[in-house]
Amino acid sequence: MADIRNVFISHIHEDDTSLGKLKDLLATKGVTIRDSSIHKGKFNEAKDPDYIKYGILSPLIDWAGTFICVISPQTRDSEWVNWEVEYAAKQGKHIIGIWSYGNQGCELPDALKDHADSIVSWNGNAIVNAIDGKDRWEHADGSLFDPVPLRRHPC
């Protein structure tokens, strides 16, 4: 029996094809994804940004146990992707960035830099591990990010 996960997948609409590929990839690892995100097959006609954010997107993100962001060159500048990541962080969601299928690397969305628990390559095992809370930061090719020295702050 497959392990079922409720996720919200943040992405730009040009990357809609990645959603099916991601679900297929995870299915080979025994994980079934129930995705609450908005995509071409699930558009809405809303025009008011506040209604879209708080009437449509926030309940969908709230429902999800895990928040995934598909990283492609265009996500960095997407106001919607950055808003979704910020909102998910405020809700205490586990936030995972996944490099889009075939991506060779690009700049991360600023909100993802600030709030991601894990950034992983397009690799089924790495993605499942990230969903399971085994966090790591990988480049698109699967190599690890260099460690970032942190300065301690007094309490």
Image (spheres, helix red, strand yellow):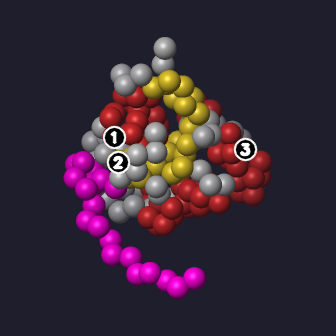
Q: At 51% across and 51% down in the image, what residue appears?
A: 95
Rendered location of residue 33, percent (x, y): 52, 29
Is 90 situated left or right of 154 in this image? right
- 109 or 52: which is nearer to us? 109
Residue tagged 3: 59
The mark nearer the N terminus, 1 or 3, is: 3
Q: Residue at x 30, y 53 (%)?
A: 138
Dot 3 or dot 2, earlier in sequence? 3
Q: In the figure, is residue 41 to the left or right of 104? A: right
> Which residue has dot 1 on it?
126
Upstream in sequence: badge 2 or badge 1: 2
Question: Which residue type does callout 3 highlight?
Answer: Pro
As for residue 150 lying within the magenta part, the answer is yes
The answer, for residue 53, to whether it is visible in the render is yes
Instruction: Determine which residue is flagged by label 2.
Output: 120
Q: Which residues are magenta?
A: 137-155
Few, some or many residues within 10 Å of mark 3 (<14, 14–19, 20+): few
Say whether residue 101 is magenta.
no
Q: Quadrant of the C terminus?
A: bottom right
Which label was assigned to residue 118?
none
